[in-house]
Image (cartoon, rainbow, N blue to C red):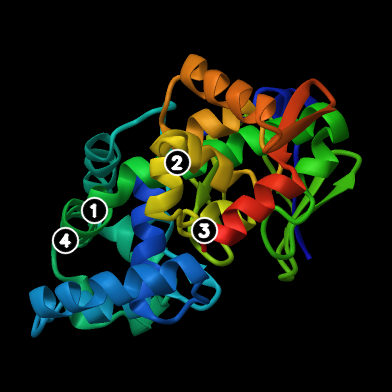
C-alpha cells in the first residue's frame, strides 16, 4: 500500500485548484486508450477523436509518446507537475514543462533501456508541450468555461463537506484506493510503494474528468498534487431542459430548477451557471415562492432542491 506522511501544517495549508494542464493530460490519457475512461471522457472522445486522429495521422512521435508516457499505472512526472500558484494559465504551466531537461524527461518515462528511439531525440519535453498545447487549443479550450464551472462546483461541494465531516470525509474515496488512515497518513493507492514524507511541502487537490486520477510533484519535490475524478453528476454533461420550460420560467430559472435534482447551495449554483450570486438568489426566491423548490440547512450551508411539484413540472416538459 502506498501512503504519504502528511503533517498537520501541510494539510491545513492545502488547497483545491483548477488546472488546465491537468485536464488536458486527462484528455490525452483518454486518447491514448491505456487508462480507464470516464463517462464524460467517452462523450468528449466521440466529439473530438476524429480531429485528433486527422491532425496527427502519420506523426512519428505522438503514438509512441502516448504509449510510453501515459500507460497503465504510470504517467510521466514532467507531465503532471502541480501549478506553482492558483489560477495559473496553461501557457505558464507549459513554459515550466518545456524547461524539463531531456535526460530528466526520458527518466520520467520509467522505461530504463526500453525507450523508443524517437523519444530519445533532443527536445522530448518541448514536443510533449507542443502536443498538450494543440489538444488544449483545439479540443479542450472551447468547452473550458463550462468545465471550469463544473470543477469549481465540485470544489465547493468538497469544502462544504470539510466543514461538516472533517478531512477524513473529504479524502476518503476522493480517487480509487485513496483514504485517510489517521495519524498523519494518507493512503494514495493500493500499490506496494515505500511511504513518502511530504512534511513541509505544499499540497494541492485538482479535479479533472479522468476516471481514476493520479498524483504528481515538482522537481525537486516541494509541492505535491492529488489529481482526482470530479464527483458523480457534476462531471457529467449538464442536464437538458426543454424549450417550453425555458419559455415558461425564463432560461436561467429553468436551468436552476433543472440542476436542483440534487441538493445544491447557492455557491454551487453560481459556479455551475456562471451567473452572479444576486441573480441566482433572486431566481431561487421566485422558485421557493412558487413551491417548486425547498431548502434545508446542512452545516453552515443552505441547500436547495426540487419539491415533488417541481419534479412533476419537469417530468411533464420531458
Establish if 211 lies above or below 16.
below
Q: Are marks 2 and 1 in contact (CB under 8 Å)?
A: no
Above or below, comparing residue 150 to residue 107 in the picture: above
Residue 261 location, x and y as percent? 66, 50
Closer to us: mark 2 or mark 4?
2
Which residue, given by chain and number where applicable, does mark 2 sit on?
A: 248
Q: CA distance from mark 3 to mark 2?
A: 10 Å
The residue sitting at the top extreme is 278
- Mark linked to residue 193: none
**How much space separates mark 2 and mark 1, taking CA atoms?**
38 Å
Residue picked out by circle 3: 317
Q: Residue furthest right?
A: 183
- State the image coordinates of residue 263 (x, y, percent, origin top left): 71, 41
Is 194 situated left or right of 138 in this image? Answer: right
Tag nearer the camera, 1 or 3: 3
The residue under label 4 is: 127
Disc 4 crowd rating (10 Å Cα; few below 14, some 14-19, many 20+) is some
Give the mark nearer the N terminus: 4 vs 1: 4
Calculate the distance from the C-alpha at mark 3 to the C-alpha at mark 4. 50 Å
Amino acid at each position: 500500500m502506498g501512503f504519504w506522511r502528511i503533517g498537520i501544517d501541510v494539510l491545513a495549508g492545502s488547497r483545491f485548484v483548477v488546472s488546465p494542464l491537468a485536464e488536458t493530460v486527462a484528455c490525452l490519457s483518454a486518447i491514448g486508450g491505456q487508462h480507464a475512461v470516464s463517462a464524460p471522457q467517452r462523450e468528449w472522445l466521440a466529439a473530438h477523436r476524429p480531429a485528433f486522429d486527422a491532425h496527427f495521422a502519420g506523426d512519428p512521435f505522438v503514438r509512441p509518446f502516448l504509449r510510453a508516457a501515459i500507460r497503465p499505472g504510470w504517467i510521466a512526472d514532467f507531465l503532471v507537475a502541480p501549478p506553482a500558484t492558483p489560477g495559473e494559465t496553461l501557457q505558464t504551466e507549459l513554459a515550466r514543462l518545456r524547461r524539463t531537461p531531456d535526460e530528466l524527461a526520458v527518466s520520467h518515462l520509467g522505461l530504463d533501456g526500453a525507450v523508443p528511439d524517437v523519444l530519445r531525440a533532443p527536445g522530448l519535453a518541448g514536443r510533449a508541450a507542443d502536443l498538450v498545447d494543440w489538444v488544449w487549443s483545439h479540443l479542450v479550450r472551447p468547452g473550458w468555461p463550462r468545465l471550469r464551472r463544473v470543477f469549481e462546483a465540485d470544489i465547493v461541494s468538497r469544502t462544504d463537506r470539510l466543514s461538516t465531516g472533517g478531512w477524513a470525509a473529504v479524502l476518503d474515496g476522493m480517487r480509487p484506493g485513496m483514504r485517510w488512515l489517521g495519524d498523519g497518513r494518507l493512503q494514495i493507492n493500493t500499490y506496494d510503494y515505500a511511504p513518502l514524507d511530504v512534511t513541509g511541502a505544499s499540497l494541492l487537490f485538482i479535479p479533472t474528468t479522468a476516471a481514476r486520477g493520479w498524483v504528481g510533484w515538482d522537481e525537486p519535490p516541494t509541492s505535491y498534487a492529488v489529481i482526482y475524478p470530479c464527483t458523480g453528476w457534476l462531471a457529467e454533461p449538464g442536464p437538458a431542459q426543454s424549450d417550453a420550460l425555458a419559455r415558461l420560467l425564463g432560461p436561467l430559472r429553468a436551468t436552476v430548477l433543472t440542476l436542483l435534482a440534487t441538493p445544491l447551495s447557492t455557491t454551487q449554483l453560481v459556479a455551475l451557471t456562471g451567473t452572479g450570486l444576486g441573480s441566482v438568489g433572486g431566481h431561487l426566491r421566485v422558485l421557493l415562492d412558487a413551491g417548486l423548490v425547498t431548502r434545508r440547512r446542512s452545516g453552515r450551508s443552505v441547500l436547495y432542491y426540487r419539491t415533488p411539484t417541481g419534479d412533476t413540472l419537469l417530468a411533464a416538459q420531458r
